[in-house]
Amino acid sequence: MSRRTVYGLLLLVAASLICARILTVPGAFSANDQSRWATIRALVENGSYSIGSREYLANGSYRDLGIIAQPEWETADVVLHPETGRFYSSKPTLLPTLLAGEYWFIRNLLNLNLRRDRLAVSRIILFTINLLPFVIYLLLLSRIADRLGTTDWARLFVFATAAFGTFVSGFLGSLNNHTVAAAGALFAVYHCLSIHLDEDRRPARFLLAGLFAGWTVCNELPAAGLVLGLMLWLLWLSPRDTLRYALPALALPVGVYLFTQYLAVGSIVPTYAREQWYRFEGSYWGNPVGVDRADEHVLLYAFHLLVGHTGILSLTPMFVAGWIGMVRSALHEDGNVGRVASARRVLGCLTLALTVITFVFYVVRTHNYGGITAGARWFIWLMPLWLLTMLPELDRWAADGRRRAVAAVLLAFSIGTANHALVNPWQPSWLFNWFTELGLIVYS
């Protein structure tokens, strides 16, 4: 059986599993995706980003009106504009704006709406924004694996990990910004690699690399480091084409995002950056519960984010190979020469730098592990890069039966975690539940 045939079979199984899950998902899993759905509905039905308003009564009390005051549409991921008294989602505005366009067509062409036909509408949208990009993501990753890998075992193992063993697949049942950012990151890297490996200087390559890099940072602010790294990579390869094509394409989604943010609240400052807007009377964030009120020492927090109850390497241990690979690729020559070797080195350096910067950023700036979630969701956009840096390391493991056995065990644990997330990504991780049952952690 050829390698491409195995790719195809694995992709078919992965797509079928995701398809089956999307066909059975509820309208929303949690406050996180509920907030996004509310914005989509508000844009189409009310022509506004506002998802509700607060009305103050003569006796000094208040009542909340609008979408978030309706049964089954409540959400904690909401802010209150102090001047207008209007509620807005705390999530970035670009993604729900684009999906509102899709909802408009669904509503007008199929006569379906999010009030009466919520399950049908949400599942159609999830197919287009989650499943279809994931299929393309796997197809492109298989091409990169063919170019950068040297053994069939490593190529297929990385592809299987991508298809079944990361939170990219695990979060596809829910509307979120993390999986679309991961797809954008891989798409951007794919075009950069095509320019690097094949000396493909067509304007479309630079345009698409810039466009997807911009899309990624619009959905994950820490991916600004990825944008900088990719643009420096392209400037090194072709300064003229980068300035003419990649940078303007990068500016397009960023500009649209800032414009939608301005349309929403009259300012380009991201809503989630306005901490004071979260502190309104009755806000969940005024008195959070459970893990959302965690206040741990920075070292303990870093431990749990790395190898603890919400750990990158404890929940998806297959990435141990990717982390070893990125360090080796960044710090040591692999003995090969030519474009493939230099591409591996660039990817290793870029991924190592982004991993360190992003990890430190979240350790310093956050405290709640991303809330009630099945895994370290803030790092999902980095996972395609860890898959690529896994390739040279697994090539080294391919000839050793014991290392292959270790890889199989690591992948089995990673698949289990990803499937736990696929059931509901907005639930505690299985390690979180286990630690709680053992009395090792208590969040109240």
Image: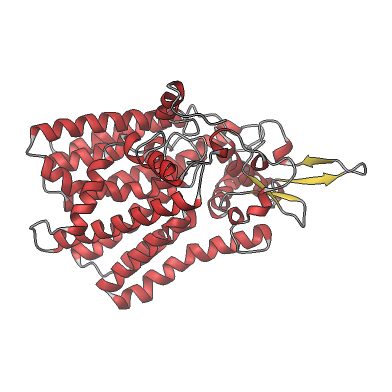
Outermost residue to the right: 58
What is the tally of numbered marks visible in this picture?
Answer: 0
Q: Residue at x 60, y 59 (%)?
A: 260
Q: Residue at x 38, y 57 (%)?
A: 357
Outermost residue to the top: 437
Q: Locate residue 397: give its quadrant.
A: top left
- Does residue 15 appear left or right of residue 282 in this picture? left
Q: Locate residue 376: give its quadrant.
A: top left
- Does residue 351 appear left or right of residue 442 in this picture? left
Relative image position of residue 367 (x, y in whole percent):
51, 44
**Of residues 28 and 330, the one drawn nearer to the viewer in this rendering:** 330
The answer to whether residue 196 is above or below residue 167 is below
**Of residues 52 and 365, the one drawn nearer to the viewer in this rendering:** 365
Relative image position of residue 104 (x, y in whole percent):
61, 47
Relative image position of residue 139 (x, y in whole percent):
28, 46
* Quarter that holds the C terminus: top right
Q: Residue at x 42, y 57 (%)?
A: 223
**Of residues 172 and 437, the one drawn nearer to the viewer in this rendering:** 437
Relative image position of residue 141 (x, y in whole percent):
27, 48
User: Could one spot residue 142 in this view of the protein?
Assistant: no
* Quarter that holds the N terminus: top left
User: Could one spot residue 53 in this view of the protein?
Assistant: yes
The answer to whether residue 440 is above or below residue 78 is above
Outermost residue to the bottom: 240
